[in-house]
Image: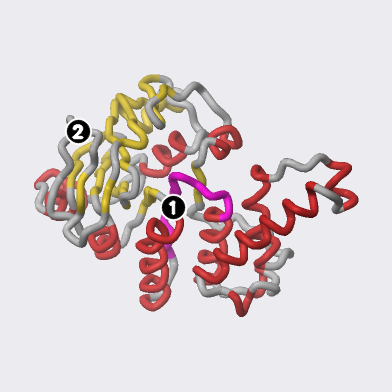
């Protein structure tokens, strides 16, 4: 999608071949190392994420991709390295604290409330925006009433954007897999994230569902001003959607660049031709 690699010494960003504006550096991962006992899941990895881009993280099974997403979202804190977010060094934080800084994510395995409606599931994405106290919420009075109306309007906009108006009152348990993935995306967008983390958003989807999800991911930035970081195994999808791609193997970074640069990287080709490892 992009012909010009950004100048790594510049925070001014760049313009893609299709005319989209990519901003300066939003987040820097600097020399990140993550261990579980004696197992090194991520080893000394550095890369950045720029405002407005679609940044992919790819690699064979067991390469450390989801671990990296867990580091970004605060589920894991690395033993070494640092995260620079919006120009400041990020301290050790819990996931809910990271979410409040404008980072939301979806998961490989769908994590929705099956017994609740689509609308109510998406509304849970607004929780950290709610300021009314418990008494006001219980009486649905004053500030709580205004908040409810404002939150409902924002959620309805997302429902329209993702074209799920027809299932808004349907219990999630009744939905096919592809629509559940779309509802999970809606809930993440309801948090109004600056950076959206998508962990295999198209896993298990058929061709038509992948086309729909690809369209929504590309439109997310235009509609909501959201930067997207995704893990995806479908290389066709990755090459079509991504502005830049970082490639991992055995916890190490083996490639970083535009889709074309990564596609022609001999080390990347060798890693993908090998046997998947866990």
- Residue 189's place in the image compared with 249, above or below, is below
- The residue lying at 45 percent from left, 49 percent from top is 196
Residue 239, quarter of picture: bottom left
Identify the residue under disc 2: 10
Residue 195 colored magenta? yes
Quadrant including the C terminus: top left
Q: Could you say whether the residue bearing mark 2 is in a helix, strand or loop?
A: loop
Boundaries of the magenta span: 190-203
Q: Nearer the viewer, mark 2 or mark 1?
A: 2
- The residue lying at 51 percent from left, 59 percent from top is 185
Residue 101 location (% of width, % of height) = 52, 36
Near-viewer residue (181 or 86) = 86
Residue 204 location (% of width, % of height) = 44, 67
Position of 153 with respect to 263 (left or right) is right
Mark 1 or mark 2, which is nearer the start of the sequence?
2
Label 2 environment density (alpha carbons within 10 Å; few <14, some 14–19, many ≥20): few
The disc at residue 198 is 1
- The residue lying at 38 percent from left, 20 percent from top is 80
Near-viewer residue (69 or 192) = 192
């Amino acid at each position: 999608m992009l012909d010009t690699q950004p100048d790594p010494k510049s925070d001014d960003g760049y313009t893609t071949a299709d005319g989209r504006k990519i901003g300066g550096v939003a987040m820097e991962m600097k020399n990140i190392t993550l261990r579980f006992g004696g197992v090194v899941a991520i080893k000394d990895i550095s890369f950045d994420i720029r405002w407005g881009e679609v940044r992919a993280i790819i690699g064979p099974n067991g390469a450390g991709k989801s671990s990296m997403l867990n580091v970004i979202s605060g589920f894991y804190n690395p033993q070494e390295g640092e995260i620079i977010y919006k120009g400041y060094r990020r301290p050790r934080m819990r996931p809910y604290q990271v979410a409040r800084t404008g980072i939301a994510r979806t998961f490989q395995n769908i994590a929705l409330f099956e017994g609740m409606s689509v609308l109510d599931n998406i509304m849970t994405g607004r929780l950290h925006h709610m300021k009314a106290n418990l008494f006001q919420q219980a009486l649905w009075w004053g500030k709580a009433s205004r908040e409810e109306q404002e939150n409902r309007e924002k959620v309805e906009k997302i429902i329209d954007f993702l074209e799920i108006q027809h299932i808004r009152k349907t219990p999630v348990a009744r939905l096919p897999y592809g629509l559940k993935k779309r509802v999970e995306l809606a809930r993440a967008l309801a948090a109004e994230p600056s950076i959206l983390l998508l962990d295999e958003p198209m896993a298990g989807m058929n061709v038509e569902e992948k086309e729909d999800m690809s369209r929504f991911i590309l439109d997310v930035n235009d509609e909501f001003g959201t930067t997207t970081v995704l893990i995806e195994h479908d290389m066709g999808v990755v090459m079509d959607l991504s502005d830049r791609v970082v490639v991992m193997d055995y916890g190490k970074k083996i490639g970083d660049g535009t889709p074309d640069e990564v596609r022609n990287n001999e080390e990347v080709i060798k890693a993908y031709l090998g046997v998947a490892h866990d």
